Image (tube, rainbow, N blue to C red):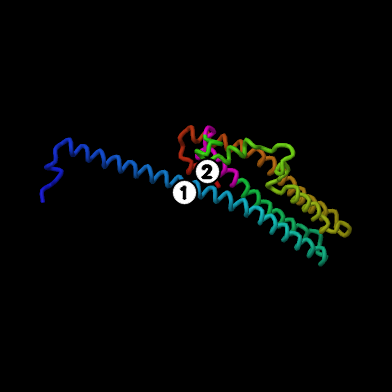
Amino acid sequence: MPNLCATMPDHGRRHIFRVIGRILGQQQSNDVTGCEENEYSALRATIRDRGTARVWIFLIGISGWAALFIATIAIGLPPVESVAPLLVLAAAFEAVYALHVGVERIGRYVQVYYETETGAGTGLTPAWEHTAMSFGRPPGSAGAGVDPLFAVMFVLAAFLNLFAANPASATRGELLFVAAAHGLFVLRVARARVVAAKQRAIDLARFEQLKSAAIPPSRNTAS
């Protein structure tokens, strides 16, 4: 069978090559778009799942602390044993805090790399993160007093946990140790709450810096 390309006129071969090039280029573009859509869907699913997990970890952690707190009082353990329920509180808080930080960081990544301010509200591009930041916390709204870290509940539980130390029968050294442990936990919660309040603006600025510098985000993000 004769070679069709060899017998075809030059302009015919050039036309075919141009068509093939356009088809291959379109296919590559579609592949990139598909990857971006998959990544966006995965990131939104991660935000949803971690947000749900954060609430469940808080509920399970508080329940575990309450059970251990009651057992410590009922059995009449030494005052230093009150640190055991406190450790459950601390572990639950650290898990909640880590999930919150990860969700906020992913949200800022989505905002910078998948949303545009001009597209927000037009339906042309995803716009939830931009809209949520613009909405803020207006006075009187249902979410104005929501604490994503449950900091108030953790601090109240820590103060209540002091009763497990049975101060009436504790020595001075035991009281100082127990008070110091609880004080450190309260300071940790307060510090984390301050940092979390600033994280959104800091992460947003950092991702915008990375995008403007054309640095691949996959090498500079942490979830």
78 relative to 13 in the view: left or right: right
SS class, disc 2: loop
Q: Is residue 207 magenta?
A: no
**Camera-nearest residue between 98 and 135:** 135
Q: Quadrant of residue 200?
A: top right
**Camera-nearest residue between 188 and 48:** 48
**Camera-nearest residue between 222 and 7:** 7
Q: Percent x, y for residue 18?
A: 25, 38
Q: Percent x, y for residue 21?
A: 28, 40
Residue at x 56% of width, y 44% of height: 106
Give the class, few, some or many, for how many residues have Cα within 10 Å of label 1's Cα (few <14, many ≥20). few
Q: Which residue is mark 2?
A: 221
Q: Quadrant of residue 16?
A: top left
Disc 1/disc 2 C-alpha distance (Å):
18 Å
Lower sequence index among marks 1 and 2: 1
Q: Which residue is mark 1?
A: 38
Q: Percent x, y for residue 125?
A: 50, 39
Q: Is residue 104 magenta?
A: yes
**Camera-nearest residue between 127 and 49:** 127
Number of numbered discs on residues: 2
Query: Which secondary structure is most common in the magenta stretch?
Result: helix
- Kind of residue sitting beneath label 2: Thr
120 relative to 69 in the view: left or right: left
Residue at x 75% of width, y 63% of height: 67
- Kind of residue sitting beneath label 1: Asn
Q: Which residues are magenta?
A: 102-118
95 relative to 122 in the view: left or right: right
